[in-house]
Image (cartoon, grey):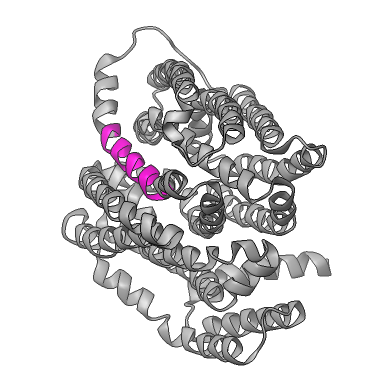
Amino acid sequence: MKINQLKAGATLSYISMGLGYVISIIYTPIMLRLLGQSEYGLYNLVASVVAYLGLLNFGFGSAYIRFYSRYKVNNDRVNIAKLNGMFLIVFSVIGFIAVLAGMVLVFYTETIFGNELTLREISTAKILMAIMVINIAFSFPNIVFNSHITANEQFIFQKVLQMVRVVANPFLVLPVLFMGYGSIGMVVVTTLLNISIEVTNALFCFRKLNMEFSFKQFDFSLMKEMTIFSSFIFINMITDQINWNIDKFILGRFHGTVAVAVYGLAAQLNTYYMSLSTAVSHVFIPRVHKMVASTDNNKELTSLFTRVGRVQFILLSMVATGLIFFGQPFINMWAGKNYNGSYPIVLLLALPVTIPLIQNIGIEIQRAKNMHKFRSWVYFFIALANVVISIPLARSYGGVGAAIGTSVSLIIGNGFIMNWYYHARVGLDMKFFWGQILKFIPSLLPPVIIGILMFSYIDLFKIQAFILSGIIYVIVFSVSIWFLGMNQYEKDLVRKPMMKILQKLKA
């Protein structure tokens, strides 16, 4: 059943993403035009600031799965109940602190955003910030329930609920935008939907998983151990917030909301790109912790690390190369000419992040081994360097300059330092890993050659030519990767589900 949950979870993740991409292709251009470039930039700017309140969870969500797995192996229901109670108390307190911190942000909105915003934008920003704070405050207690669902490998429920959110959000938001309520209406609807999802998670835990809570004898020794473990995850969270949100804030301070809008669209596309990877690795989190808790066999962990990384690379390499050849005309037709500047930014963000994306199962291996301290400090100092580099670059070159700072930090941190650490300290065989990844190079040559020819000789800004060229490119890539790149395990991941579908259709 657990294997089925893993496969179904990964499959549903991609179905959900596929739906999300299709809906986004239709929804985003309508939303951009209804909001206008300035208000869309304002929305991104406020969201980037409020996102820092997410740091208040201090990485405890990741700690839950580690400590839950420890008790689950021994079927220790008493300590699991205590763990649940302790986490619910902690996250409820954090939610309350988030509200207080949010009130401070609302009160000092003018100081935070500087002089580039108009009085009307400042007024709207205050309202947006207040609503977003409520949203994030309610999300903290839900971390306990969501983590419990993940720890129990209930991926089918989790991914179906995710699909509901993906589909429901634009259908609820668009009528509000058409009625003229703008970004404020959009954020109100999103908040109500998120709260509904969070309540559903809680009900599932109580009714289906029989989740138990014990609020007696608060375990301070466990809390101390958990805090030490989570402190380095917290540092890593700070790093992520700096890398993915600080650029918008810098641009807002120096160039205003339009520059934030252009960067924000590129960041949104980069988020879609990143989700292709995390959808696969997410379902392996409980398995990694169980493997480490039971055997801690580095050979088996390297095998899993490489197997998942190759699957992630197949998906990401198709999207990354396609983005290079088709990204500019796509953005032009999809979002409008005002967003042409997003193309170089999304390339600067997406291409370097490919390295950590095909290795993100390694993050959980580090956490399971309690060896994530080094990564956290490395990323923290590189993120600080990112800020130092990005400020002058952003002032001089706008969004492209800000993206260069982020790109350099990703290449240094993930491309060099972390790969050395995985090999030399964590015990993963990175020579074997990269040897397996580099085997894909011959299979990438045919689609890259086709892409260069299309880019050079076809007017991809015409929609018919764009669609036809895109279809041909995907076909060439798929055929090439199948015959020249994929091994038997990867082919079976495609072939076996297809055979089952065909058998059912024949039956």
Q: Is 103 situated above or below 153?
A: above
User: In the figure, is residue 134 to the left or right of 59?
Assistant: right
Pick whichever, 138 or 387, lies toward us: 387
Residue at point 49%, 76% (across, down): 488
Residue 505 at what x, y percent from top left? 81, 67
Pick whichever, 229 or 455, lies toward us: 455
Rendered image quadrant of residue 203: top right
Residue at point 75%, 70% (across, down): 502
User: In the figure, is residue 419 to the left or right of 491?
Assistant: left
- 299 is within the stretch colored magenta: no
- 238 is within the stretch colored magenta: yes
Residue at point 42%, 18% (across, down): 97
User: In the figure, is residue 129 to the left or right of 229?
Assistant: right
Residue 196 at what x, y percent from top left? 68, 28
Q: Is 263 situated above or below 218?
A: below
Q: Give the main secondary structure, helix, strand or loop, of the magenta stretch.
A: helix
Q: Is residue 304 visible?
A: no
Q: Is 49 situated above or below 442?
A: above
Q: Is residue 187 visible?
A: yes
Residue at point 63%, 55% (across, down): 17
Pick whichever, 39 or 347, lies toward us: 39
Rendered image quadrant of residue 98: top left
Residue 436 at what x, y percent from top left? 36, 75
Question: Magenta span covers which residues?
Answer: 230-244
